[in-house]
Amino acid sequence: MKKVLIIALSFIAIIAPKAFAQKTVGGTVMSPAKNIVQNASGSKDHTTLVNAIKSAGLAPTLSAAGPYTVFAPTNEAFAQLPAGTVDNLMKPASKANLIKLLTYHVVPGKLTSADLLTKVKEGKGRLELNTLSGGTLTVMLQGAKLYLVDEKGGKSFITIADVAQSNGVIQVVNSVLKPN
């Protein structure tokens, strides 16, 4: 009986963190067993982002082992851009600009909100992150929210934190971050 109880408790300890780590984004439960592209493709709130990732040819990169932290703007965030911006970025002639914009939202490594908060505190209120595009994002804490400040001074905050992926983590953000 003791062996069965120990085995059962061990099994629960192994699977429980995965079960509790699942979050719903865009009406879909995100699976920590799926990669960034697979999970984002299931979110009705990220169709613009997923279309842009595919248009830019970044799906293989964001499906690879990583790990990556993706600051994922929602459809609503893309809709805040000036009229025609997204359509222009999706044109073949703008592919380099689209790649730069999207990779500006990706940081190497898996950074949870707790990791970001700890590093912001260690940095006396600021943390600079180097993005895959070669740009810099600044993370700051204002009130109870982690904010990202882009190179143009625009601010975004994390609306859904710590969406676990097999190859990293997604932090859902409320606006599109803009590199120089």
Image (tube, grey):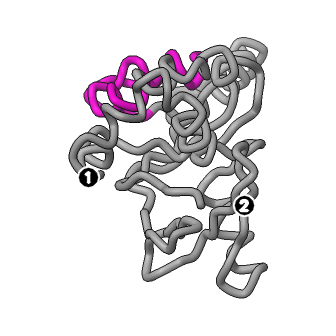
Look at 74% across and 16% down and name the residue there: 7
The amino acid beneath tag 1 is Pro
> Please, what secondary structure does the residue beneath circle 2 have?
strand
Question: In the figure, residue 144 lies in which quadrant?
Answer: bottom left
Viewer can see residue 133: yes
Label ID, residue 65: none
- Provide residue 111's location: percent of width, then percent of height: 69, 50
- Provide residue 30's location: percent of width, then percent of height: 44, 25
- Provide residue 94's location: percent of width, then percent of height: 49, 32
Residue at the spot of label 1: 82
> Please, what secondary structure does the residue beneath circle 1 have?
loop
Crowding near the residue tagged with mark 1, few <14, some 14–19, many ≥20 C-alpha atoms within 10 Å: few
Label ID, residue 129: 2
Q: Is residue 74 left or right of residue 144?
A: left
**Foreground residue among 65 and 131:** 131
Q: Is residue 6 left or right of residue 158?
A: right
Q: CA separation, marks 1 and 2?
A: 26 Å
- Proximity of marks 1 and 2: CB atoms separated by less than 8 Å: no
Viewer can see residue 31: no
- Provide residue 22's location: percent of width, then percent of height: 47, 31
In the rendered image, the quadrant that contains the N terminus is: top right
Crowding near the residue tagged with mark 2, few <14, some 14–19, many ≥20 C-alpha atoms within 10 Å: some
In the rendered image, the quadrant that contains the C terminus is: bottom right
- Chain-order first, disc 1 or disc 2: 1
Q: In the image, is residue 115 above or below residue 117?
A: above
Q: In the image, is residue 65 above or below residue 132?
A: above
Q: Which residues lie in the magenta part?
A: 23-50
Look at 74% across and 70% down and name the residue there: 119
